[in-house]
Image: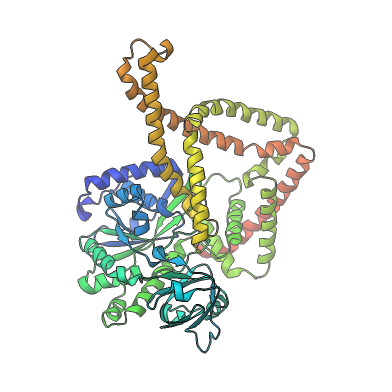
Amino acid sequence: MAISLDDNYGPVPWQYNSIAIFLSRIAGIFYREIGVWGLEKIPNTGPIMLVAAPHSNELIDVVLIVSVLYTYFKLPISFVIAQRSMRRKFVGVLAAGLRCIRMNRVWDSSSLGSGKIFAPNFRNNPRLIKGRGTRFDQEVEVGDWIMIVVDGKQTLRAKVAEIRGPQELYLEASFLESSDYGASNSLEVALTNTIYYLASNPEGSDLMRVTSSVSAELKAGSIIGVFPEGHSHDQPDLIPLKTGWAVTALSYLDTNHDPNFRIVPCALHQAHGHRFRSRAGVEFGQTIRVPPALVEKYKNGDKKEAAENLKELVYGNLKTLTLTDSSTSLLETTQTMRELYHGQSGRCSLRQRTVLNKRILETLSSKRGGPGVDSLLHRVDQYRFQLRVHGLRHHHVKYAVFNRKYASVLLLSQLCKLLPVILATIPSLVLFAPVLILSHKISGNKRRRALKTSPFKLKGTDIIASWKILVAMAVAPCLCSLYVALMTYWAYQSRWCSMLPSYIPTHMVPFLGFCLLPAITIVSLYTGEFAVDVLKSLPQFLILLRPGGTRLMEDLFEQQRKLTREVKMFIDSSIVNSQGM
């Protein structure tokens, strides 16, 4: 389905068309399935600020949104992108073609300070900062910014007013005064012994230029995309939103008084977004019109509070749309409960799974600690743990009803399917092994480096996919050209040892090579995907054939049956009846 809104938003430049088509193909190759819903909520006219979260897949999140908007609407979107990303040559070219607006973030120019800092008298004199192993007199200058990260999510910063020695300095304003951070207890705990970062230029120095560029695009009726969290991350919950985008939106409305301007929240659902051939969902929420009271407050000079209020409004909408929670364990339990609820009733769509997951999570978050809820969660966790220990998935347990003889037949059948598929995959696997090796090695190195330099990452999975794709896009064409050159040389020397048919001219070999190699790769991609699916279907048969395996599968089957009944009763009574699913 493609809905054209070009008459309302203007023609799409050919450069954008070319890049959007290219990125759409990249998204189609990387993701097995891309689900999209809420398209009807995108306005037909007027400038839009699209606010997307969670930002869990660095550059791939941009590719995903560009692909969706182009595929369904043929609409261009310009993102506000970090200057650090623009410095990458290939990314910079694509970003320029997409008319992205660069932003110099203070975090990108920061450096890790020596030692650790603490506030010796946080309650009475929070501006006094001391250090252990620090070198303030060598590394810091008056007017520099010192930054800390609280709870692995919130960045706080303050300007240095006075340097009193290598292990003591004084701030112009405390971290709380500078950042409007409410959780003073967490800050007090953090400032007992924490690492810190130093930067020379505040983020606000670049905000005026970005605001001007964004306002010009919005005035032309364009769509501007922002990731309000400010950083890509792999945390289970949203990290606190930045304020710059809210200031930009309010500044535009203060200057232009545009009644058609709206903010569209966008949720990116990627349970395993860093994995090749995973699934992704893009959900657009109800449009938000900025309350006139906030614009008036901004106009009257209370800019900081107006921006904070708008940020809270959008955060609430994003929190409703996204499947996020501070507990990774609770998210995994929610997924298991959804699988138990659907049981063997058939495959449901990505949208249905996401909607039910969100409603289960909301119910568990509100009823946790209630009668019977914790007991049910404990049993579901035990079931999930047993599946993980034995390398099984929820849908594998149904094979417990088969005896060993039938399991042997099914295993042999799956292996017969697997053999020709593996043979079809081997040519591409051998030819492009350097791409696989380099992408794995480089993305791993980048992940480890990101973990050392960024406090927002738990495992660094948010950058893996981006670097794998960047490496593949750089190395694969070079490798393909090398193979074509070798094929051509061999053809001119001996016509491939007389194996090249006489009706194929030698000068046609390069053309055939550039057609044949991508075709082999695409075929191997899908056959390899099928092979992986077959391999994932083998564990239950192998367990049934080993000693004691039948008993284990029967116990899991009985446990699944009981849990399915309990979970269905819980969901039907707590969610379906109350929300009318």
In depth, the one of 375 and 343 nearer the eye is 375
- Whether residue 147 is visible here, answered yes or no, is yes
Give the image quarter of residue 571.
bottom right
Q: Nearer the viewer, residue 492 or 380?
A: 492
Residue 29: give x, y in percent of width and height: 42, 40
Tell me residue 358's x, y (percent). 51, 60
* Quadrant including the N terminus: top left
In the picture as drawn, the residue positioned furthest to the right comes out as 547
Location of residue 48 (image quadrant) = bottom left
Q: How many marks?
A: 0
- Residue 75 in sight: no
Q: Seen in the image, is 499 located left or right of residue 292?
A: right
Question: Is 329 drawn above or below residue 276 in the view shown?
Answer: below
Query: Quick check: 420 left or right of 310?
Result: right
Residue 401 is situated, as x and y percent measured from the top left of the image, at: 71, 39
> Is 508 in front, or is 366?
508
Residue shown at 70%/64% (left/top)? 375
Residue 356 rendering spot, x and y as whole percentages = 52, 57
- Residue 391 vs residue 218: left or right? right
Residue at 37%, 49% in the rendered image: 63
In the image as oriented, which residue stretches furthest toward the bottom?
124
Colour theme: rainbow
Residue shown at the point (41%, 36%) measured from the top left: 476
Q: Is residue 447 above or below residue 114?
A: above
